Amino acid sequence: MPHTLLDIIKQNLPDASPDARRLFHGRGQTVAGLEAVTLDWYPPLLVLTLYADFDEKWLQQLSIGLQQLFEKRLGCLVCQQRRTAGGGGRILYGRLPEQSVAQENGLRYLLDPLAHQNIGIFPDMAVGRAYLRTIAEGKSILNLFAYTCGFSVAALAGGAKKVVNLDMNRRLLERGRQNHRLNEQDLRSVVFLGHDLFKSFGRLKREGPFDLIILDPPFFQSGSFSALRDWPKMLRRLPELLTDSGELLAAVSAPELGANFLRQQIDSAFPGAQILARLTGGADFPEQNRDKGLHLLHVVP
């Protein structure tokens, strides 16, 4: 099986660009036997993510094969085994640089390759960050479920007037501050709120109203958010935070959800809403079922 994956990677080797790329998207169910594998390139770092158990012999064969394919371009290969409770990434080859960074369209985002699960950026959302830069100029923006503030960095790069980032995890918001500093952006235009959304509408009203609200919630966040329960409740409250001509950029990317779920939520909350754009993860994120994977809607409610 490593040979099948290596053959695919060989046909998809990245060029000399410093930009991040997904080199293999097994989660899209397009290659039998490799549905639990993804491989991301953050030059000179490769991150292999496994959502099922693979034996050590398989891993070692794959590691050797990737070293041969990338030769001197590969500085480090990290493996994340998501089935390992409480575990983080481990180095299969090489050495991590003092600072690991994902580059994307001239912007930079800090990575923690050995973190448990998410390492600091969601690569499939590159299309969303790029799109946001094209519509952000002059806007006051609310970035809900901000994570490490990738959308905020992209918004300021696109000329946003102000961005308010809200996330319950203050540690991740601090990483967001570092991402802004890494890109030499003016923090006076950025607000970081470490709060639960449903307990923060009063504060958000004082920061608003907003020209654009970004919604990229997790499928489930213990004690604070459940997609099936809370999407309707969240959408009902948003008009009180928007300007009269305000817009939404709404996303789902959990395997349990899909384009139909997102459209149903929008249609239910805002009958007659105008859809300005529909986006997916793009060519690096093929999906056997087109309803699955990343989906974004740019909406005027």
Image: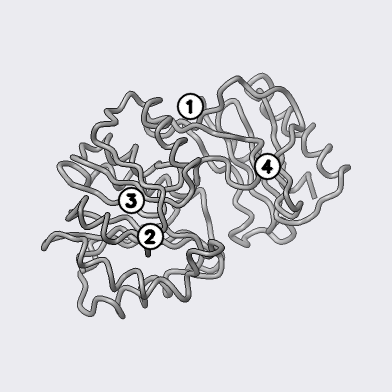
Front label number (1 vs 4): 4
Q: Position of residue 221 (x, y in %)?
A: 53, 61
- The crowding category of the residue bearing disc 1, from other C-alpha atoms within 10 Å (few below 14, some 14 to 19, many at least 20), is some
Which is in the foreground here, disc 2 or disc 1? 2
Dot 2 amino acid type? Leu
Write down the quadrant of residue 112 in the picture. top right
Between circles 3 and 4, the one closer to the viewer is 3
Residue to which mark 2 is pinned: 197
Task: Name the kind of residue labelled 4 in the image.
Answer: Leu
Taking 278 as reference, is 239 left or right? left
Residue 291 locus on image (x, y percent): 47, 70
Tell which residue pokes out farthest to the left in this image. 244
In the picture, the disc for residue 143 is 3
Instruction: Determine whether, in the image, residue 111 is placed left or right of residue 248.
Output: right
Q: Earlier in the sequence, mark 2 or mark 4?
A: 4
Cα–Cα span, label 3 and label 1: 27 Å
- For residue 18, which numbered disc appears in the image? 1
Q: Position of residue 125 (x, y in %)?
A: 44, 49
Please name the residue shown 28% across and 51% down the image.
Answer: 142
Callout 3–callout 1 Cβ contact below 8 Å: no
Place residue 87 in its image quadrant.
top right
Mark 4 lies on residue:
48
Label 1 vs 4, first from the N-terminus? 1
State which quarter of the image contains the C terminus.
Answer: bottom left
Q: CA distance from mark 1 to mark 4?
A: 18 Å
Report, in whole angstroms, how far the alpha carbon at label 3 lies from the one at label 4: 29 Å
User: What distance separates the C-alpha of mark 2 from that of mark 4?
Assistant: 33 Å
Q: Earlier in the sequence, mark 3 or mark 1?
A: 1
User: Which numbered disc, 2 or 3, marks the residue that appears first in the sequence?
Assistant: 3
> Relative to the observer, which residue lies in front, 266 or 1?
266
